[in-house]
Structure formats: C-alpha cells, structure tokens
Image (cartoon, grey):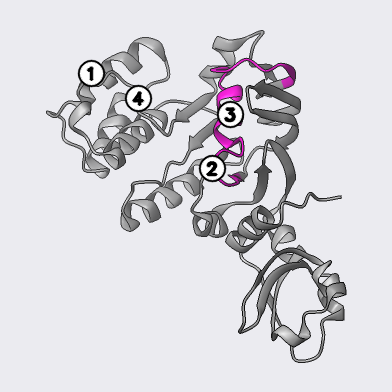
Amino acid sequence: MPEILTLNGVSRKFQGFELQDVSFHLQPGYIMGLVGPNGSGKTTTIKLIMNMLRRDKGNITVDGIDNIAEESKAKKCIGYVSDENIFVEEWKPIDVAKAMAIYYDTFDKKKFMTFIDRFELPLDKMIKNFSRGMKTRLMLAAALSRETRLLLLDEPTSGLDPAIRAELLDILQDYISDGTRSVLFSTHITTDLEKIADFIAFIYRGKLMFAQNKDDVLADYRIMKGRPSQLSEELKKQFIGLRESQMGFEGLIKTGDSMDAPAETVVEPATLDDIVVYHTMGGKEEA
C-alpha cells in the first residue's frame, strides 16, 4: 500500500516569506499533527497539498498520485476542512448535500444527514448565519460523508466547544481505525494532538524543524527550572528557549543535555506546547 501523503523538497516563495524544502510522509492508519506559530507555514503547506497554491519546486503525492499532474484524481482522495468556509454563504446544508452529490460519486447523503444531526446543525439556516464553529462542523460533515483516503484539516477544532472537540477527536480515530486512511491535522491546540496524534511535524519560519513519532518528540525534550544562581553562562547555551526572572529560570532543553543538570534544579517532561513555545522563543534550528 503506497504512502497516503508524501512531500519531497517542497518550496514556495512569497514576498517576505518562504516555505523551504519541506519533506515528510504519512503512512496509512496514522494521524499527523502539523504545529507551529501563526505565520510559520502550516496553512501554506496544506494549500500546496490541495494545489490551491502552486509549489515552486518539489513533489507532492496523495495516495501515490501527483497532486498537479492528476489534480482531480488526487483531490477525490482528500476530505478537506479549511480554516475558512468553502461553501457558498447563501446555501443551506441541504444545498451542500446536493452539490456534493454532483461532484463526488461516493458521497453518502444519509451519512451526511447523520452528521448534520450529530453536530446539531440547522437545516433551514443559511451558512452566512452560522457561527465559525458551525461552519467548521458543516465542512466536517461533508468531508466525512464520502470515500476518502486522507483527511486534511486546517485548525478544525478552533471555535468548537469542548464537547464537540472531544467528539471530533473520537471521529478522527474511527476514521483511521481500518488502517487504510490517514489524517493531517493542523492546530494550535496541542493538547488535542497529545491525545490522538501518532506523528508531529513542526514548522517554524517556513522550515520543517522535525517530523517525528510523537512519543519520540516528547522523549527528546525536558523542561528545566531553577534559581537564578544556578543559571551559568555555560548552562544557558544548552537551552533551546529560556525564560528568566528575578525568581528563577525555566527553559526547554534536550533530554541528553538535562543529564548534567545542576543539583537542586527541577527537570520535568515537556509538553508539545512547551516544545513549540520554547522553540519559537529561542529561534534555534535542529542540527
């Protein structure tokens, strides 16, 4: 079975920003979280996969299909949820169902209506009158109601209340459960990824910092805390990102470097949020 998604040396240059040489792959049956601060290149990466932006160089395949040479075929493999509404604002959910049935022969209206009910969306209301969370739920209902191999989600949990967000995470795990489908999930809510992601890809300033197994990522880093007197200039050099105050210091450090921690400093496991935040503060790149 081919990889569900492959990016190889993908670049795209804009005025003032460049996505540089991004390469990663996603096997069937897994969820990958795409993380990074706003403006780092997450949405650009997703739009390049969807061919909504043309890459300057590199290759992208979806289920072994080149996303430019066979764009229509590649897109039929993808269920896409944007961070903005993709449907006509004057439509109602039933109009979305009609359009989906025309464009996609695998669209299942019964399944769509089940999701509409499950997500508590009104059938008689125009999309322009939906909240952001409601629009996201509508796009999810459409994406989940046809046969796809890849769910491509750009900030899908933003604007969702905690109960719906938890339900979505369950739905994503159900989606990949047969081992033939995958999810690429861009979000700034890293706690969601700690619950369900198998792999993490971290993009910062247009560069891919790492794309690794989530458990390996979490094992690679530690948070170190201590008093100001314990923070030597030599120790400072070990930190990826560091906060200092009159009360003490706290920073992100590689697990191997934490082995030489000064006595009485506190070393704790790092969360994904810690890893993203401190990389952003420090601006360091992985060797």
Q: Is residue 206 left or right of residue 50?
A: right
Considering only order in the chain, which callout, 4 or 3, is on the residue closer to the N terminus? 3
Residue farthest left in this picture: 124
Residue type at mark 2 is Asn
Depth check: give the residue in front, 88 or 284: 284
Helix, strand or loop at disc 3?
Answer: helix
Query: Closer to us: mark 1 or mark 3?
Result: 3
Residue farthest top in this picture: 69
Depth check: give the residue in front, 270 or 168: 270
Which residue is located at x 26 percent, y 44 percent? 118
x and y, in percent, of residue 174 in the image: 48, 46
Q: Is residue 137 left or right of residue 106?
A: left
Residue farthest bottom in this picture: 264
Q: What is the span of residues highlighted in magenta in the rendered image?
A: 32-59
Which residue is located at x 85 percent, y 70 percent? 256
Q: Quadrant of the N terminus?
A: top right
Considering only order in the chain, which callout, 1 or 2, is on the residue closer to the N terminus? 2
Q: Where does label 3 land, which residue?
A: 44
Residue type at mark 1 is Asp
Q: Where does label 2 land, which residue?
A: 38
Query: Closer to us: mark 2 or mark 4?
Result: 2
Q: Is residue 147 left or right of residue 34?
A: left
Q: Mark 3 near mark 4, Cβ–Cβ under 8 Å?
A: no
Q: Is residue 275 shown in magenta? A: no
x and y, in percent, of residue 265 in the image: 74, 86
Q: CA distance from mark 4 to mark 1?
A: 14 Å
